[in-house]
Image: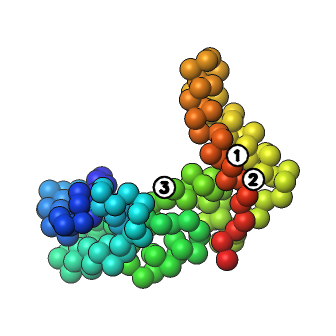
């Protein structure tokens, strides 16, 4: 499996050529992130190029290779819309899972989860336990956890669901 971006810079978009080469090389699945490395999060993901790559993949007889789209998936309904409009087999969630670790529950339930205060606290406790398991409970593990936890605390304290 392979994950690519649209290209390195806006002036060197080469994802369609890369997807073709990857298909011919025998990739078993291809994920396309809809931005260049240079763009970071400064622009919206380009789902039109992802759609074009899916279209060309099917037209060239490679419909057996799953195509996965990535970029700006922050809600369950955005994921569904992107899948329908682009023709990808699935989506990959990045930032959406960092900001809303329960986004996968929303995908399953096909509904927005609106956590109350107690549920938000439980999310923090679960997240802190996962970080303790992953990073360890020594000084270095706590330092690594505290790199991420304030960001999550700040987000969840002001979270309101998207319309």
Residue visible at 33% across and 78% down in the picture: 48
**Element at badge 2?**
helix
Residue visible at 48% across and 66% down in the picture: 72
Residue 113 image point, x, y percent = 73, 64
Residue 107 image point, x, y percent = 61, 66
**Element at badge 3?**
loop
Q: Which image quadrant is residue 13 in?
A: bottom left
Q: Is 145 left, or right, of 4 in this rendering?
A: right
> Which of these two is toward me, 21 or 147?
147
The residue beneath circle 3 is 94
Q: Say whether disc 2 or disc 3 marks the residue closer to the N-terminus.
A: 3
Q: Residues within 10 Å of mark 3 (few under 14, many from 20)?
A: few
Q: Is 36 left, or right, of 76 in this rendering?
A: left
Q: Residues within 10 Å of mark 2 (few under 14, many from 20)?
A: few
Q: Say whether disc 3 or disc 1 marks the residue closer to the N-terminus.
A: 3
Residue visible at 73% across and 58% down in the picture: 158
Q: Are marks 2 and 1 in contact (CB under 8 Å)?
A: yes
Report whether residue 158 is seen: yes
Residue 55 image point, x, y percent = 27, 79
The residue beneath circle 1 is 153
Instruction: Give the answer, above or below, for where 162 lies relative to 153.
Output: below
Mark 3 and mark 1: Cα distance apart in space: 18 Å
Return the mark for residue 157.
Answer: 2
Query: What residue occupies the far top of the structure in this picture?
Result: 138
Which quadrant is the C terminus positioned in?
A: bottom right
Report whether residue 23 is seen: no
Q: Is 143 left, or right, of 41 in this rendering?
A: right
């Amino acid at each position: 499996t392979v994950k690519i971006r649209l290209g390195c810079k806006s002036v060197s978009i080469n994802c369609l050529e890369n997807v073709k080469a990857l298909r011919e090389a025998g990739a078993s699945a291809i994920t396309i992130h809809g931005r260049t490395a240079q763009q970071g999060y400064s622009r919206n993901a380009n789902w039109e190029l992802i759609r074009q790559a899916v279209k060309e993949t099917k037209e060239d007889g490679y419909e057996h290779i799953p195509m996965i789209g990535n970029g700006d998936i922050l809600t369950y309904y955005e994921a569904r819309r992107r899948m329908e409009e682009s023709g990808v087999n699935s989506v990959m969630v990045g930032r959406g899972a960092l900001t809303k670790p329960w986004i996968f529950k929303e995908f399953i339930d096909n509904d927005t989860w609106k956590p109350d205060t107690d549920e938000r606290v439980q999310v923090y406790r679960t997240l802190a336990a996962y970080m303790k398991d992953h990073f360890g409970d020594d000084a270095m593990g706590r330092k690594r956890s505290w790199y991420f936890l304030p960001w999550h605390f700040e987000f969840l304290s002001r979270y309101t669901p998207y319309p």
